[in-house]
Each structure stands twice: as structure tokens, then as C-alpha cells.
Image (tube, grey):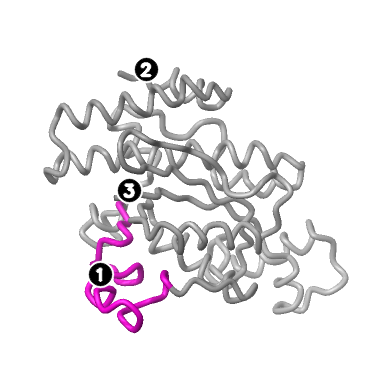
Amino acid sequence: MNIVVFDIETVPDVVGGRRLLDLQGLSDDDTAKAMFHLRRQEAGTDFLRHHLHRVVAISAVFRSKGEQIAVWTLGDENADEKTILEKFFHLIERYSPTLVSWNGSGFDLPVLHYRAMLHGVASPTYWDQGREDRNAKWNNYLSRYHERHTDLMDLLALYNNRAFVPLDQMASLLGFPGKMGMDGSKVWSAFQAGDIKGIRDYCETDVLNTWLVYLRFQLIRGDLQEAEFLNELQIVKDYLQREAHPHFLEFLKQWQSAE
């Protein structure tokens, strides 16, 4: 079975903000500030509504048959939002993987839905609820209780938002690295500074944490035995060492120091 663990990073959609909130004539920075201010007045939080998040990175862990694993960010550093979305949904069309996320149902996927609508990005396999594939009626990507998409945070909390846990804390509690050098609140400033690589690297460490937490979940529900679980961890370590990207090596260093 192919498994894709995914995570997205976003910035304010300043073009959409100008259109919807009558902010014409403002710079990107001032538009974003106005969007945050209006949102605070509306809801007491800076967190924008899902449709006003522009996707700037989608990272994935791809685990396929055998001992094959890959970690990467879709598209290159110059890819626009539509290209990034097309590459994500192409993965689904080509491989029909099991999707794994942390809060993907609450944030990542709704954002991807709205942005795919905006750009006209099609994905018949993703949206199928049994019309084309009868089996998809009982196991599809859209149902909260099906396994084509496993939102680990939602499932572990028993679908109770009072029991939600941040990925950083859950990963660290289990002895994995957690956050490394950036968090979601810093993505907009990093984007303004042109640090797209830093955003992509951060997103990749988030999907690595999610994958490791998912492996522990696979252990407790009996899909992996102890020896298999340890072997999966070693596969990740070997991959990080082999690829030798600086953020991979730092992730590995922090992981080993926490063991």
C-alpha cells in the first residue's frame, strides 16, 4: 500500500483579501495586516478563514512497497500555487494512496479544497464517493471515519476538539524532534523575506514528525509488530543520513539526542 503523509504551509491570500474585503490600493504587507486586524475584530484571532490561505508549500513523506521512502516538497521554489496543487492531486490520481495528516481534516484539506476550486484543479479520484468506484462509497478521502485519509490528531482525540494536541508536543512526548527553528506563525514573515527554502525545509520536518507519530500509532493498533516498528524507524534514519540535506541531518541529530 502507498502512504502519503502531507502537510501544507500557507500565507495570507492578499489578492483575495483585497477583492473580498475592499482593500484595493494597499501593499501586500498592509493588506495582510488589515486582514489580520479584521479577523481579530470578527473572531478574536489572527487565524484567517480557510479560503483566504494561499498555499506556498506542500511536503510529503511517500512510503511505498518494500523499503522505499521519500521526503520532498512538491514543485520547485518558484512553483506557483496552482502548480503545487496540481502536483498534490496528481499524486492521488496516480497512486491512490492512503493519506495521513495531523489536523488535515480541520485545516489542510479544507484549504486545498477551496484553493483547488479557485484554480480549477481537478481530481476525480479524490472526490469520488462511489459514483465511479463503488468501493469508494464505503472508503473514500472525504469521510471523517474512513481510512483513505487518516487525520491522526482528530482520531487520537476521538473527534473531540477539547482533546486536540499540537503535533510538536505529541512528537516531542514520543521522543521525536518536534518543531525545528520555525512554526506556522513565522511563515508569513519568512515568505516576505524570500525564505521559501526555509519554509519548505520546515514543512518537511513537520511531515517527518507526523510519519513517526503515525508509525507509533500503527504499533499500538497492531498493524506493526515491535520489530517491524523499529525497522521502519531505521528506514527513516538511513534515508535522512543518505540524503544528507542539512535540515535532515539536524532532524536526525535532535532525534538521536532525544532517544
x 24%, y 57%: residue: 155
Mark 1 in CB contact with mark 3 (< 8 angstroms): no
**Residue 187 in the image, given as x and y percentages of width and height:** 63, 46
Residue matched to label 2 = 256
Counting labels gives: 3
Residue matched to label 1 = 139
**Residue 46 in the image, given as x and y percentages of width and height:** 58, 60
Of the residues under marks 1 and 3, which one precedes in the sequence?
A: 1
Looking at the image, is 250 positioned above or below residue 95? above
Name the chief secondary structure element in magenta.
loop
Q: Amino acid at mark 1?
A: Asn
Q: Secondary structure at mark 3?
A: loop
Q: Amino acid at mark 3?
A: Val
64 horizontally vs 26: left or right: left
In this rendering, which labeled residue sits more in front, label 2 or label 1?
A: 1
Q: Residue furthest bottom?
A: 131
Q: Amino acid at mark 2?
A: Gln
Residue 210 highlighted magenta (yes or no): no
Q: Which mark is residue 165?
A: 3
Q: CA distance from mark 3 to mark 2?
A: 23 Å
Q: Residue furthest right?
A: 25
In what quadrant of the picture does the C terminus appear? top left
x 62%, y 76%: residue: 120
* Rendering quarter of residue 32: bottom right
| Segment tinted magenta in the rendering | 125-152
Mark 2 in CB contact with mark 1 (< 8 angstroms): no
Crowding near pointer 1: few (<14 within 10 Å), some, many (20+)? some
Q: CA distance from mark 2 to mark 1?
A: 38 Å
Q: Which mark is residue 253?
A: none
Residue 138 highlighted magenta (yes or no): yes
